[in-house]
Image (spheres, helix red, strand yellow):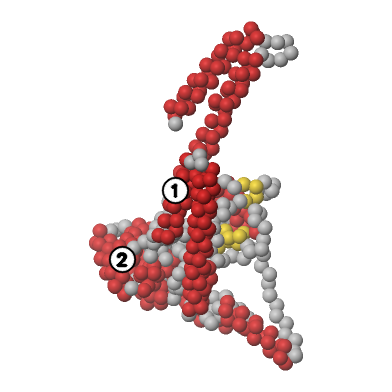
Amino acid sequence: MLKNLIILLALAVFVVSVATADADKDKDDDGPSRLEAFAAKALYNTVLVPMMYLGAAFGKLWHTKKNTPKTPKINLANLTSSKVCLDQYKTGLNERLTTIEQDNNNSTVSDSWTNVQQAIKESAKTSAGVNTCNKQKRIANDTISELSNRQKDLRLQIQNTDNEERKIKLRNERNRVLHTIRKTILEQRNEELEKKVQKINEANSDNAMFKAVKLLNQKHYENPSMEDSSGKLFINPNQTLEIVANFFKEKFQNKDLASIASFQGIPRKLNKPFTSEEVRKSLESLKNNRAPGGDEISGELLKYGTPLLHKRIVNILNRVFEEHETININSGELIAVPKPGKPKGPPKNLRHITLLNTIRKALSIITLHRIRPHIEEYLSHSQSGFRPERSTSDVAWTHKWLAAKAKKEDVEIKITGIDIQQPSTQ
């Protein structure tokens, strides 16, 4: 390819040189000479047009290289469904945590937590494995492959024959093969659709129902486009990322407010240090099938951990307050999701979801359990957030029950609510 490009450039230089040398011999007063016109046309056909295609090809290659592979995700289904796999995870985790304690007795809080995270990930990968690539592929089986090869062979025969009568027969046969391929693919897609519907009917939990419906409504990925403040549209991933980041940065950060220090006073021990029992209860209350934060540690990896893991976490959390050293629990990954029914482009039509580190969730649960007895008496009955038996499903059921009661008894019940334009989901 490079050799051909060099030849084209050399030819163009030669043509332009000849045209320049002989232009005066054949030049009219009214316009350019015939050699100049010939040189311009040759330059366009031999250099500019090929360079356009080459530029498009190189641009495509560059864009492909920019797509870096994602970190493989741990197969949590094996961990939660197989007792053998779970036992292997716990055994490997205890071995790695014991080795860490022997090798890093004088490490900092941050280094200690990093080592624990590494032990968790390595144990999970060894026992549960990682998920394979699940990109959507074209539907294919042995029958479709044979038919596809057949229609390709017929296409070659059509191109290589000069007999018009034979061409017509080959085209008719190829059309029949293509029709059979389309019919077979349609039947196979209908079978897969029926399987998905069956999964929805057999789902015995809200989470299973959600996963089945998500699988049924799975859509192809669309390259996101975003508008800046002036209304200009961008489709480059780096530019759209910058627009979204700046939009939410303005909403979350107030430059007029002074930053709050992570710790107050001198480093000291807690009056009531954290205990292994508190950590165990908080980790056991974590829900499965939740997206992890930047630490890439799912709740299942901590939830199904061992008492030795609880001991390590307790030691790290207590040292955070005793030594005033953070373990990056305040960081999170912001995921911007388009709001349904809203036009695509403006950043204001995005709903943000913040993925927090799992250790942050555990610490929040411990804190909530400690302060709940002291603040419960000050909360009204209508307060539902972060209270037991006040989930979204409970609130929705209560609303429907009140509506049914008002309709049945012909009474008026007033329900007040707040329409939040920019809700925050964590």
Location of the N terminus (image quadrant): top left
Question: Mark 1 sits on what residue?
Answer: 153
Residue plotted at (31% across, 68% down): 89
Question: In the displayed structure, would residue 106 be above or below residue 59?
Answer: below
Tag 2 secondary structure: helix
Quadrant assignment, res 123? bottom left
Label located before the other in sequence (1 or 2)? 2
The kind of residue on which mark 1 rests is Asp
Is 38 left or right of 310, judged from the image as shown?
A: right
Q: Inspect this view and state whether residue 101 appears.
A: no
Question: In the displayed structure, would residue 386 be above or below residue 45?
Answer: below
Quadrant assignment, res 15? top right
Q: Where is residue 317 in the image (x, y as percent from the top left)?
A: 39, 66
Distance from Cα at disc 1 to Cα at disc 2 = 47 Å
Question: In the displayed structure, would residue 145 be above or below residue 161?
Answer: below
Residue plotted at (49% across, 44% down): 158
Q: Relative to the observer, which residue lies in front, 220 or 237?
A: 220
Residue plotted at (72% across, 92% down): 409
Q: Where is residue 174 in the image (x, y as percent from the top left)?
A: 50, 52
Question: Mark 2 sits on what residue?
Answer: 127
Q: Position of residue 79 (x, y in %)?
A: 35, 70
Q: Are marks 1 and 2 in contact (CB under 8 Å)?
A: no
The kind of residue on which mark 2 rests is Ser
